[in-house]
Image (cartoon, rainbow, N blue to C red):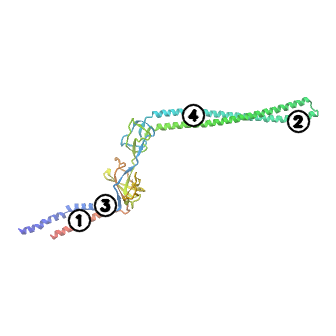
Amino acid sequence: MSENKSVATPAANSVPLNKINSPLFVCPAAIALALLLYFGLKSVADFLTHEATDDAFIAGHVVSIAPRIAGQVAAVHVLDNQLVRSNELLVELDPADYAITVAQKNSAAASQDANFRTVIAAVELMRAKVATAAAAARKAKADADASESTVKKTQADFERAQNLVQEKTISSQEFDAVLAANTKAQADLKSARENADEEASKVDEAQKQLEAAFAEKEMALSQLNESQTNVAAAKLNLSYTKIFAPCAGRITRKSVEAGNYLEVGQQILSIVPEEVWVVANFKESQLDKMCAGQPTTVEIDALGGRSFAAHVDSIQAGSGASFSLLPPENATGNFVKVVQRVPVKIVFDEALPEGFVIGPGLSVTPSVQVSKFVLPPWLLAIAAIIFSATAVWFFKFLTNRKAAAK
């Protein structure tokens, strides 16, 4: 019986080795080992050539919407989280008060326009008066010049008559006639000169009245421009009763309903545009080889860790703590060195999938390639296969050797 036991023991021990060496066990084990080696090598390669952080989130512009005028809400045309287009109507305020103001300003502008036209007519009339006065002044001066010529003639006749009367060439009656003509001419010259001076003063008076009319015209024009500006301002306020979307995006933080009374600048909702980026807070020790333009892979938690291609856009000039509301004060004597984090802006290179709400604040995990030399996946796969095949061969070699030894 002892001989039977000694014979049966090697047979019993050889069964597990045969099962281990069978392809049904070796092939799955080799595949599993190759996969483990591939992901292990990839993790090591990524650790050496990439910098990653989980302190990162989606960022984007948030456009706050507030009315420019006060008024009661007549209608709200959007809902929470609704996607809107640019220039789409969001909210309407009651326009009645502002429409009345526009009508009043229009009436005032029409009155000022009529007043301006009246002043223009007055200016034209004063221009005609100036022209008439100038013509009369010219005529009076011409009459004065003519009277002066007559005086010169009569004076010469009078002087000749004086000589002739001494020589008794003419009679006393003729001399008296020449003297009377000279005297009359002198009186006419004096009257003509006085008339010319009077007409010249009328020209000056008319010119001053014209200047006053021009000043009144400028004032009337200024009042007309002011009234037209008031009309434009009233129409602008009336247009503000309709609030439109300044950009395309999704409605958030909506806090307005029909019937609410709104004040100027009161925030009623926000619009989050579809354009987003990533703000990653890397440790300062991770920035040694990081620079703008480096390729990045971003995993979005809200999409189940789905990865998207991106690149580093810029690195903030300073740590996040330095720009916080209460920056740390290190000159107090109790300084403790803490590794700082620096915000890095990362921009997506591919469009994000439609149908998903990806907005500011969502968590992501970016991985920045900081090394120019990166092992391609196919090379890692070949290395994993070679290592796996070597390990399987060595394992089979050992098992076969052990089986042969028994």
Which of label 3 and label 1 is nearer to you?
3
- On the image, the x and y values in percent for residue 175 come to 89, 31
Residue holding disc 2? 159
Residue placed at 11% from the left, 67% from the top?
Answer: 9
Q: In the displayed structure, does residue 263 sit left or right of residue 401? A: right
Which of label 1 and label 2 is nearer to you?
2
Quarter of the rendering containing residue 401 = bottom left
Q: CA distance from mark 3 to mark 2?
A: 136 Å
Going by the numbered disc 3, the residue's amino acid type is Ser
Q: Does dot 4 land on a helix, a strand or a loop?
A: helix
Q: In the displayed structure, does residue 212 sit left or right of residue 381? A: right
- On the image, the x and y values in percent for residue 322 come to 41, 55
Quarter of the rendering containing residue 53 = bottom left
User: Could you say which disc has been placed on residue 113 in the image?
Assistant: 4
Q: CA distance from mark 1 to mark 2?
A: 157 Å
Q: CA distance from mark 1 to mark 4?
A: 101 Å
Quick check: marks 2 and 4 in contact, CB under 8 Å? no
Q: CA distance from mark 3 to mark 1?
A: 22 Å
